[in-house]
Every structure is written in structure tokens, then in C-alpha cells.
């Protein structure tokens, strides 16, 4: 009974952790725009949190480099299952314009598994919201699979 309530509330009020791997801040500004009343991502019940142990969705922006690779892995490991990873922007998907740099690992999927890719340079707030909502659909599917 309580377990079902927790799972339902997890889908109705997911908590999102945003991690910037070190980008130009273009995508970060767009992620913050999602929190403004104009786009209002909170209408879906999504709350931005700072603790990976409370997060259901990991939203990653920027190019993964050797310096922040371990931090990204640790954040992913600390999140409870089921979880969803959303990679935003050209840098998060492939490394972007920095992909040929000596210190760049590449996109987020080179380090952790990615569920939803949001293209753009920078990604528009509408696309970011759409990516997070798609991630919530995947989260619901994973909860059903775990229950079965």
C-alpha cells in the first residue's frame, strides 16, 4: 500500500538534479528558463533539487571532461533506482565544438547511460521540458517492469 503510494507520487512529483559538466552556460541558462513562470516546468510537479539521493531525473548539460567524469559517475551511482538521465545540448550529446579537445571525453553517454537526448545549441526550454516529460514516461515504464 505504502510502496504503491510512493511510486505514484514519484511519477506525479519527480525530483530533478541538474549537473553542468562545464559548458558555455548556454544550456544552463535555458534550464533555468524552464523554472521561470513563462515555461513553468513545475506545472508537471517537477522540482529542482541539489541532492542526488532524492533525485529521479538527472539532467546533464555540457561537455564531459576527464576532470568531471568521476563526479558524474558518482552522482549517477548515488541516485536511487529507477532513474532517468537526460542529456541536453550539442555538448552533452557529442562533446559539441569541444569534442576534439585533448581533455574532452565526449558526450554524456561515454560515461553513464543516457535515456533521452535533447539536441540544440543551446537546447530550447520547450525541448528540455519535452525531454524531461519523455524521461518521466520511461520512469513510469521502469516502475511497471520492476513491479512485475
Image (spheres, helix red, strand yellow):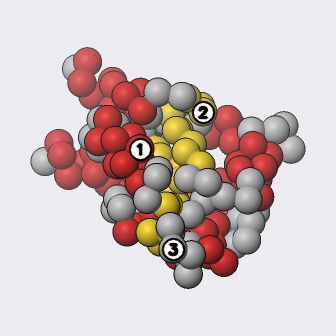
On the image, which quarter does residue 45 sit in?
A: top right
Label 3: state its secondary structure: loop
Answer left or right for 25 relative to 137.
right
Q: Which mark is residue 71?
A: 1
Answer whether labels 3 and 1 touch (C-beta < 8 Å).
Answer: no
Outermost residue, left direction? 148
Q: Residue at x 46, y 52 (%)?
A: 67
Q: Residue at x 42, y 48 (%)?
A: 72
Q: Which mark is residue 48?
A: 2
Identify whether 79 is placed above or below 125. above
Q: Which mark is residue 102?
A: 3
Label 2: state its secondary structure: strand
Outermost residue, top direction? 2
Identify whether 132 is placed above or below 49. below
Label 1: state its secondary structure: helix
Q: Residue at x 34, y 37 (%)?
A: 79
On the image, which quarter does residue 46 sit in?
A: top right
Residue 93 shows in this picture: no
Amino acid at each position: 500500500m505504502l510502496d504503491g503510494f510512493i511510486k505514484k507520487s514519484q511519477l506525479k512529483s519527480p525530483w530533478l538534479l541538474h549537473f553542468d559538466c562545464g559548458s558555455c552556460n548556454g544550456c544552463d541558462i535555458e534550464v533555468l528558463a524552464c523554472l521561470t513562470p513563462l515555461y513553468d516546468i513545475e506545472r508537471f510537479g517537477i522540482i529542482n533539487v541539489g541532492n542526488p539521493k532524492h533525485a529521479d531525473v538527472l539532467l546533464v548539460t555540457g561537455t564531459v571532461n576527464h576532470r568531471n567524469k568521476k563526479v558524474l559517475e558518482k552522482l549517477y551511482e548515488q541516485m536511487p533506482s529507477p532513474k532517468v538521465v537526460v542529456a541536453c545540448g550539442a555538448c552533452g550529446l557529442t562533446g559539441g565544438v569541444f569534442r576534439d579537445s585533448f581533455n574532452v571525453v565526449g558526450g554524456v553517454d561515454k560515461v553513464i547511460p543516457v535515456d533521452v537526448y535533447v539536441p540544440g545549441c543551446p537546447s530550447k526550454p520547450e525541448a528540455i521540458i519535452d525531454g524531461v516529460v519523455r524521461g518521466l514516461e520511461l520512469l513510469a515504464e521502469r516502475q511497471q517492469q520492476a513491479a512485475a
